[in-house]
Image (cartoon, rainbow, N blue to C red):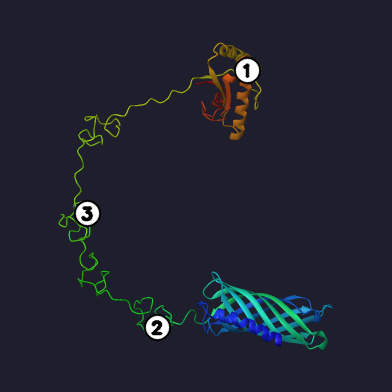
Amino acid sequence: MIRLHRKAALLLPLAVLVLSVPAAAQRGGTLEVVPLARYSFFPDSITLSNAFGVGAEVGLFVTRRLSLEVEGSYTVTNLPDSASVTAAGLDTRLLVHLPLQGKATALFGVGYASRHYGRNLDEKQEGPGWLVGLRLGIGPRLGVRLEATGDYVTSQAAASGNQWDIGAQAGISIYAGRLGPRDADHDGVPDSEDRCLGTTPGLPVDPTGCPLPHDSDGDGVLDGTDRCPGTPVGQRVDQTGCNADLDGDGVPNALDRCPDTAPGTAVDQLGCPPPAPPEDSDGDGVPNGRDRCPGTSLGPPVDALGCPVPVVSPPRPAPRLILRDVTFKTGSATLTPESEASLRLTAASLVSEPAVRLEVAGYTDDTGPRATNERLSLQRALAVEKFLVASGVPADRLTARGYGPADPMASNATEAGRALNRRVELRKVD
């Protein structure tokens, strides 16, 4: 009993701290009902098998953070000889609700527990108990409770002494009754913060619960500062409640430097018609005052000074020679004998032009994966390069590259077109 008093003394500062936390959904008078499932770890003294059971908690909030709770549970288990035993529990506790981040609430409870075992075991145990848990809100009135309980019970059998009865349980938390802080006049401001209790229902109020100033003509200017009460509905007004734009050009009177603009006239941000655009005699988009080439004919592009932009011819493609007689064994980079004979003639021609540098470019059709085709085209280009070097062409004049199915010369939809696309070219490199 002394230990119990010490625990209560330690919990008292925690309860004071919790009571100072701002209110959440529940309040004094809210009812909480929790149907639950429980797994019990029975004391060793009664040699029962740990087992699942069912139960329910019913709590009544005394304040926003304190509730009185009663829990009942029922479990069917068995003795070592398989004889069936029923365990009925009744717990009463004081429960503290401590808000955490988001919709989570920590639960701490102390109370008294009673256990009665029947059917094949006549035993009763009771003693102080505690609860630690977490409530996860999933709506204004629904939540999930996850809890652990421990009861330090005394057995009727004197030799058994005190034992711990431990349990783990989970349930669905349901709030019943009114939620939130009390608001007697239903103006959305809690009574504790309402400086004007009894406000007429439906009347707009400020954060203190007092009626907002009125705007009888609905122009957005309160009656106390409206110099033009009774403004027609829909008419724009300035901060004094009077017509803000007398000439209707979209610029308020306070900023309008041309307040008598004719209706329908386009105006700038100061309410005045914009100046006429500068003259452009040749219509090239460059005003005459900046045009160094007046009289430019329509069509050709001009620069910022109105002069024609010189036309730059596109670069000519590098010359290339398609080695039509160079073929390979199917699916490989091995030259055919006919290809070697043709390449010897090509090598002899290249040796006679020592200043020419060339790229050996390999291509395939689009049959098969692109990565495979690119690898095969490079291998074939390297095979041609290797043969030309072996035939006397200096290696520093040749570069091999594989392009796979890129830049087809014919359609890959026909066999003839695919045959043309499988080729090796020699391109002159500057």
The mark that comes first in sequence, 1 or 3, is: 3
Q: Residues within 10 Å of mark 2 (few under 14, many from 20)?
A: some
Evaluate whether residue 150 shows in this view. yes
For marks 2 and 1 on the same chain, the one whose residue lies earlier in the sequence: 2
Q: Amino acid at mark 2?
A: Asp
Would you say 338 lies left or right of 194 here? Answer: right
Q: Are marks 2 and 3 in contact (CB under 8 Å)?
A: no
* Residue 190: image location, x then y, percent: 43, 80
Q: On the rendered structure, is 18 left or right of 191? A: right
Q: CA distance from mark 2 to mark 1?
A: 100 Å
Q: Mark 1, mark 3: which one is toward the viewer?
A: 3
The picture quadrant where one finds residue 221 is bottom left
Mark 1: few/some/many CA within 10 Å (<14, 14-19, 20+):
some
Residue with the mark numbered 1: 389
Q: Which of marks 3 and 2 precedes in the sequence?
A: 2
* SS type, badge 2: loop
Amino acid type for the residue under numbered disc 3: Leu
- For residue 185, which numbered disc appears in the image? 2
- Residue at the spot of label 3: 270
In this rendering, the label closer to the viewer, 2 or 3: 3
Give percent across and percent down for residue 411. 52, 28
- Of residues 219 and 412, the one nearer the viewer is 219
Query: Residue placed at 20% from the left, 40% from the top?
Result: 278
Q: Which mark is residue 274?
A: none
> Residue at the spot x=53%, y=84% of the render?
63
Residue drawn 46% across the image and 23% down it: 317
Question: Is 348 placed above or below 330 here?
Answer: above
Q: CA distance from mark 1 to mark 3?
A: 79 Å
Kind of residue at badge 1: Val
Picture coordinates of residue 302, whole percent (x, y) = 29, 32
